[in-house]
Amino acid sequence: MTKLFLRYGLLLLLLLGLAAPQAQASHLLGGEMTYTYLGALGTGTTPFRYRVTVLIYVNAALGGSTPSSVPDGRPQITVNFYNKSQNGILIRSLNMNRLSNPLIVPPGCTSAGTPVPVRLCRYEATVDLPVSFDGYYATYTDGTRNRGITNLANPSDSQQQTIYMEMAPPLLPNTSPTFSDTAVVVICQGDTSLFLNNAVDPDGDRLVYSLVTPYDRLVNNNQFTPPPIAVQYAGGYGPTTPFGTSPGNFASLNASTGLATYAVTQLGNYVVSVEVKEFRTINGQQVQVGATRREVQLVVRTCPPNNSPQFTASSVAQHLFTVEEGQTLNFTLGTTDADGNTVTLKANSVLLDGTGGYNATFGGQAGTVLPGALTGSASVVGAGGNASAAFRFTPRCGDARANPYDVVITATDQVNCNSKTIADVFQIQVTRTAAPTALSGDSVVCDASQVRTYTAAGPTPAGGYTWRVQGGTIQGSATGPAIQVRWNGTGQGRVTVRNISAFGCQSDSLSRTINIRPASTLAVTASVPSICAGQSVTLTATNGTTYTWTGGTGTPTSGSSITVSPTQTTTYSVSSGDGVCTTTRTITVTVNPLPQANVGATATPTVCSGESITLGAAAVAGQTYQWSPATGLSSATVANPTLTLTNATAAPITQTYTLTVTTTSTGCTSTAAVTVTVNPGATANAGTAPTFCSGESAQLGTAAVAGLTYQWSPATGLSSATVAQPTVTLTNTTAAPITQTYTVTTTTLLGCQATSQVVVTVNPLIVAQPGTNVAICSGASAQLGAAAVTGLTYQWSPATGLSSATAAQPTVTLTNTTAAPITQTYTLTTTSASTSCAGTATVTVTVNPRPQVAPNTPLTVCSGQAAALTGTTAAPGVTYAWTSATIGDLDNPASPTPTATVTNSTNASIVRTYTLTATNPAAVGGCTNTAVFTLTVNPAVNVNAGSNVTVCSGDTPPQLGAAPQAGYTYQWSPATGLSSATVANPTFTQTLAPGAGPQVITYTLTATTPERCSATAQVVVTLNPAAEAVAGTDQTICTGLTTQIGAPAEAGLTYQWSPATGLSSATAAQPTVSLTNASTTALLTQQYILTVRNSFGCSDRDTVLVTVNPTVVVTPGASPRSVCSGESITLGAPGLPGYRYQWSPATGLSSATVANPVFNQTLAPGSAPLTITYTLTATSPQNCPATAQVVVTLNPAVDVQAGPDVAICAGKSTRLGTPARTGYQYLWTPATNLSSATAAQPTFSTPLNGAAQTLRYVLRATTPQGCALTDTVVVTVNPRPANDSIQGTASVCPTVQGVAYSIRNPRNTAYQWIVSGGTIASGQGTPNITVNWGAASSTANVRAFQLNAATGCSSDTVAFPVRINSILLTQKPTGPLRVCQADGPYTYQTQLTAGSVYGWQIIGGTQVSTSGAAVVVNWTRTGIGKIVVTESSNPAGGRCLGTSDTLFVTVLPSPAALTVNGPARVCTGTAATFTVPSIASPTYQWTLNGTVVPGVVTNSVTFPTLAPGPYTLSVVATSSGGCASPAATRTFTVDPLPVAPTVTGPRSVCPEGLTGVTYSIGSASSTSTYQWTVVGGTVASGQGTGSVQVTFSGTAPTRSVAVTETSQFGCAGPATTIILPLDNATVALNAASVDQTTDRKITLTLSVADRSNNAGQVRILRRNAGSTTAFSQVATVANAASSYDDTSADADATAYEYRLELLNSCGTVLNSSNHTTMRLEVTGTQTGSGRAQDAVSLRWNAYQGFAVQRYEVYRQADGGPAELVQTVTPTTAPDYTVSFATSAAGFDQHYRVKAVGASQVSFSNEAGRAFTNELDFYNVMTPNGDNLNDQLTIKNVALYPGNTLAIYNRWGKQVYQTRNYQNTWTGDTQPAGTYYFMFTEASGKVTKGWFEIIR
């Protein structure tokens, strides 16, 4: 059975000696001691004050068996205090009066004796103790104990009772734990009883309970070393076995809760002592800070039987509960009683404090606190043996502590006698949300203008953070782990942070002290705000000491300025320090990128001559372009011009173009170069178009050109397909001509190509008819062949003996000189005139012999040379006869072999003809034979060696001989010295060695004519030695100096210099040159020509160049100069580039080596002027010197002294200045208050005024040399100081020392004090003094007057009365009277008086700290708070006391901390709304970046749009009482919208470039994404990036590319949209037609389809048809043009090939098909035979360019209309030929050919032919209806309008007459016969004739 005895539960204290004799001092039953630290409220050497409480349990029996000797307790006790730091020395004995002694007689039944009354005596007092770093001991000893104590050695009354406690040191403020109940206990014998020793510690320290030994007494009352002397236990008993060790006896104590469990089997009285030690965590270690004890005597008695109540199992399942501040804890406790008794369930705890601050209930009750108790209790009663209640606790913010709160639960059954109680202790550990573990940030702020960041580290709180800043302002949010602070002013600041739990409670604070230094004025500027890449910028820092620069990629540098060349936008920092602070300023240099100069895919393109290429790339918006040079460019200002260059040379040529690209917005430029190699163009010439007959061959092409390769196509019929001139052989088995077109492609070694075509026409074979074989005599004739056929030509071979080699039937005449018949075979080649084809056949002619003569062997002889004519060998019977026009040339004309001699004096050969006739009458046929002999006589030889020559060695070589004769050959002898020995006029090139004599050479020339006739001639050449001129090396001299030119003279030579300018002699070999250059900047050059001549008249020339450097500019400045001592003047002038300067002497000059040094020198006052001559030597960049001088006169310094500054009081006078110097003049400004303005020492009289006045006087002194200087004197007029007031203590304790008094708001620093009733201890002469006061007085006072230490002026004396009395009139505290609870702590103070100590009584708040006469208060509840201050002073004159009036403070509730809700980032242009939770009746003030948002007082604010940048939004809620919540802050960023991207890429698309089109963003951001939208196409790759590949649809109606940049924060900027027109223009040349009115104009019909997106011009290109040369541009026309008239053409002369070119937007050259015009020519006419008309043959080349459906041949006769005369079906032939009868159409006929296509037509030129069309009258009529000669036909009659025809029969009768006869008369009924006609033309011409009618 377990039972608990508490106060009021069978609490009977039985005197231990019930059966023993009475002891007189037997009154002590136990006791305990506690203390409370009050603060540093003591004085002098005992500044630390404590309140000590001693409870003594005494026997209150007045009689009976155990009467008490002191039944009321002692009226006063003495407690001793010992200093641990002084080895336990006694430092204070404190007498403590009894404050109360209530009698404790608990109700209940009597069992085993009579209850003993007990008094609880309470003693309490304050004590002031000296400093101790280790703490104190407090002891109280009294005697004696009761006799008969069971567990002590007897006699027990011989042992005393000592209670002691350990006190913490004052530097560790502490209050000892206090036991929560009164220790009066009775234990039932045999039961297990629970005894509560639970204590409450106000400091929350951890308590440890233990059973310890009771103490008897001290060893030494003057010095204490614990422990005291312990009591003597009876045998078998001890501290932990106070009931002995017999079975059934035990004692245990819960060390954490103090719950003791006792079981005793033996009746008796037992002493038990419990020690409570308190431990506190200091610097992470558990340190014992104190200990206290309770000693109690327990009585064991016999109790009636009763079952104890029991706690339910669930109630005791958990004893320790952990809860966080602000969190609600609920746990239920229940009990049952086996006997069914009513049970009272009671909770006891400090938490049950009723209306106190703890928010705890038990069974719904807040608890009741008895007076003087630290704990409260609440009870619930349960009937039927069951009781339960819930304990609910919601700890407030601030309730957390290191150690748990104890909740003692007891359950007591309600029995009339022997109620049983059980108990248990439950602990609640209240934790505070974890605090930040670290606070980082700058502790020294060197630049308050810079926002600083402070960051809390440690656990992340659920409720955020709360920050407070002293000395600065939070920028932005104050609820996150980091804040930004802008510090104000200078001095000390503080940052404090706390975590906030999920329940709104704050953690412990973490603070950081900040040293705010004065702001730095360091500044940094840039020479220019931005640069282009590659440029430099100078950064300059000012207002610092030393400078360190960082930034970019370089190492840190020093200096006040640096020059940097960043490659990208870079931020540079400059730092400057003062030893403590280093201030950094940054500056950003914006580097604008250079535009990309894109010259194209390659920087070295190669093209062929005449080809076009596109340079550059697509234009970029915002950039301009300039190409240089513009040669060959379509434009020099576009990004991608078309280049066309030609190369007419045989080698490649290059042209370098430089592209300069400029970004308009930044002015940045970049250049790039492209070098274009133009290879020579290939030339291709397929040759003229051959036409030959089947089986024949022709050579194509032209001669091969070195470096070209050839390729023919096709190879059909070619001897080679790879040579320049292959042979073509083709056959034609058809009846019509066939054609074959060959294309030759030539390729240069560099890959350039050209093509040319040739059309080969193969005509059919022609059959030749040479006739039958014939036989003739030698020399006779016969006719060969057959009748000629129209259109054929004839060629006989050989032509020997033929009358014509081209007639169809030539006559052949042949001779036969042999003796036998001979035959001659002739081959006839018959050729078609239209096709040039030929057929061959042979015929044989037999020639019978004639007499023999020698054949003609032409002879050639030179003029005058004899020639033998060998006619024949004389034959018998044959006679010979020579005939000739110059028969005289022959020596024997009858000889068959005469000799001819002829002289030819002409320039050409002459021919003589001689005919030999041999006659042999006897030969067969009697034939004769002749032979003609020719003799060619060449002209005489013309040989000319030229005139004799005399020449100087080395001169221009002379030419010998004369101009060559055509065909001559020449030979000179000897060949020595000649440029050639085989030319007609060689050059004589021989020279002589120096010093050699003249040489004479004779040359012989042999000339041979083309006929190999020769002749000779001679010429004599005299070669004289040369003269040598040496002008010397080029010279450079300074102007005015000399130099020598030439070389030493040589004998026999004469010298001549030109010009003679500057020469010492113009005829000397080495003259001296002296020249002057008037220019100071330009070089002067003079070239001299030396001519040297020797005795042979030979001369030589040489040149030398003399350069004269510019005249040296030396400018010493104006002279003379005069300057006053100490003044600066500048000598010289600004230096010239490249010059060096030297001044002499250097005295007084800032530099002796600059062009314009500053002169500054001093000369003592009164000295004579000093004259200095300076010489300046200037050396030009060419190292030429010059000197000049300047004279400087230095005048002595001015001695001016206005005198020392003076300060006087109003009304006084003083003398200014110093004695005058001789010759000086003086002038004072202003003259006010001075006795003279021109005296050196005037008298100053002060004005009478009441305010301070400072006057400044300037004295100007001028020396005799005119040098002047000023000096200033300041006169300060001081008024009498104003009266002040005194502040200090008006009520002091007698004899108190060191009371402070001061001047309130002193105006000065010097005061004189007078004290009545005391003495001045310190401070005389200052605004503050301390006074030692004397005895009590009502007339004491303090007086003072101000003494201006600077002026000696004093004020009136003021007095401050002082009351000296032991009753102090303590001033009511001052401080804020209306406060907001959350804004504390608040400071309150009273007048501080030396020697006084102050105690503070605070109601409604807690004391945070005290200092002097001030207290810092945290108000803990709202409502009315009260403050009363008690003042005490204890000087030598006696103790003084005073109490102030009560200060009432209204404490207003503060709104709770707010949380700002809203976005962390927002894009500019997007509205941002921020809110805080709404609370009752507040007003809100929103602040954005430190600026109040106007007009918004609600809990929500919306910003429609904000500029980009970081923002700090703060809001404070202010209650109706004016209390503001902590500033809730939220930082957010307004992100800028990206700008519209700059897109590079094509601005149009073309059909050939619809895929892989690249669009890019210039300088695309790596953190942005890019959304590309393509209309009319798709993004093939790169979506989301700064570069995409796009594929466009060829059929889309529209196309565009748009891109939007979205930053990394999700902000989308404006889109850049490029509308992309589809440039699908096509250029077509529809037709090229010769104008029908003039052949000098060709009209081109053209069209550009889909041209709306093309702005190009159409180029009209032309070349001659069939040519392979490059096209030439004729003109350009707008692409809207539908036609163009080429008026530079001549369609009669040639056919033209036209082509059109158009450049599209993508740089592609669009070509039309080529069109070739038709050139018509009349190739011939054929005269019609009989009635047939004359025919005409027309030929024209095929039209090329459109599909010709037919050719229409039109004829216009005699100016009439054109009529279609023939239609020709097209073939593949290159040319067309037609013939038709046409003469009847008119006399003057013109023809045109019209090529007709599906929708196009083209006309050829006009070709004409005139016809005579004479009338031809046919003379037969056969009018029989067979359509043959049925009418009388007059050919061409229709061409003779206006005619008249009359027909007569043979009898002359007219049978028919008509006008305008048209061949219509059919003879009517006229009979057959002869008729006559008369035809009269309109002109009157009459033709008469006859005809016959045959029927």
Image (spheres, helix red, strand yellow):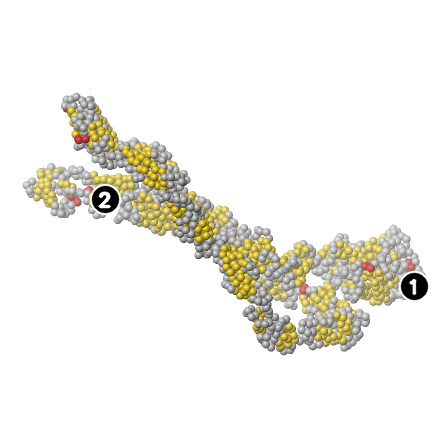
Seen in the picture, residue 1307 relative to 649 is either above or below; the reply is below
Q: Nearer the viewer, residue 59 or 140?
A: 140
Task: Assign a secondary structure to mark 1.
Answer: loop
Q: Which mark is residue 639?
A: none
Seen in the picture, residue 1072 relative to 844 is either above or below; the reply is below
Label 1 vs label 2, nearer the camera? 2
Give the class, few, some or many, for how many residues have Cα within 10 Å of label 1's Cα (few <14, many ≥20). some
Question: Measured from the top left, where is residue 1113 in percent x and y?
Answer: 48, 57
User: Would residue 1779 appear left or right of 559 to someone viewing this image?
Assistant: left
If the image is split into quadrants, where does the C terminus sit? top left
Residue at (65% x, 58% y) in the render = 579
Q: Report whether residue 1684 is seen.
A: yes
Q: Looking at the picture, which amino acid does disc 1 mark?
A: Gln
Residue 128 found in image quarter: bottom right
User: Where does label 1 land, which residue?
Assistant: 24
User: Where does label 2 land, which residue?
Assistant: 1808
Q: Looking at the picture, which amino acid does disc 2 mark?
A: Gly
Seen in the picture, residue 987 relative to 1306 is either above or below; the reply is above
If the image is split into quadrants, where does the N terminus sit? bottom right
> Marks 1 and 2, how far apart in space?
179 Å
Residue at (51% x, 47% y) in the render = 1582
Task: Assign a secondary structure to mark 2.
Answer: strand
Question: Measured from the top left, where is residue 1107 in percent x and y?
Answer: 44, 51
Question: Measured from the top left, where is residue 949 in percent x and y?
Answer: 32, 40
Q: Nearer the viewer, residue 47 or 1328?
A: 1328
Q: Nearer the viewer, residue 391 or 36?
A: 36
Question: Measured from the top left, where is residue 802 in percent x and y?
Answer: 20, 30
